[in-house]
Amino acid sequence: VLNGRLPTYDDYSALTYTRAIFEETMRLYPPVPILSREAKEDDIIRKRKVPAGSLMLVVPWLLHRHRDYWDKPDHFIPERFLDVNNRPDKFLYLPFSVGPRVCIAKMFGMVESVLVIATLAQRFRLTLPQGTDVVHECRLTLRPRGALNMKLEPRKAK
């Protein structure tokens, strides 16, 4: 798509595979893996009473890996996001949350991330040093525990 040039905002819609890579990464490693919400009114969920004011947890980490909703849920398969007519339900894939509390910067984050990936990937190969064990931790957001040192190797010009 880019033929070696830097991407611009106008390239975003054409970078479909790069976007699919980003979306699949967000599926497996949502930035906020646990969302809390307060029930506004009494409700019943799966035959259980939920009183108004109850703290409810939505767990994208588990939802994005649920075997009832995802084929090979623990595998990295960007192609699952390529078919625009077969997108996951908005309540099954929510790396930026959903509804009235959706991340206000969702589109900015999508575009910026895709353009950064496209910029880096055409110029560098990123690898982990041999023997590196990546362990994630969740505070408010999901992140690697400790430092995540990467090796950047320049790609050969075509």
Image: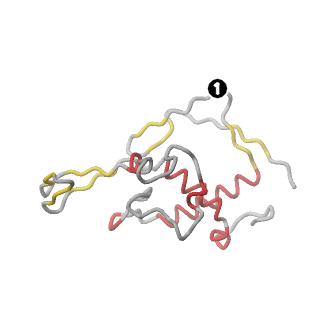
User: Which residue is more in the foreground, 32 or 51?
Assistant: 51
Using residue 23 as the reference point, say whether residue 140 is left or right of it. Answer: left
Give the quarter of the image for residue 22. bottom right
Using residue 52 as the reference point, say whether residue 12 is left or right of it. Answer: right
Check the image and name the residue furthest to the bottom: 10
Question: In x, y percent, where is residue 14?
Answer: 67, 69
Question: In x, y percent, where is residue 134?
Answer: 55, 33
The quarter of the rendered structure image containing the N terminus is bottom right
10 Å neighbourhood of mark 1: few (<14), some, or many (≥20)? Answer: few
At label 1, which amino acid type do we have? Gly
Rendered residue at 66%/35% (across/down): 128
Rendered residue at 69%/38% (across/down): 127
Whether residue 75 is situated above or below residue 43 in the rendered picture = above
Question: SS of the residue at dot 1?
Answer: loop
The quarter of the rendered structure image containing the C terminus is bottom right
User: Which residue is more in the foreground, 3 or 91?
Assistant: 91
Q: Which residue is mark 1?
A: 131
Number of marks present in the image shown: 1
Check the image and name the residue furthest to the top: 131
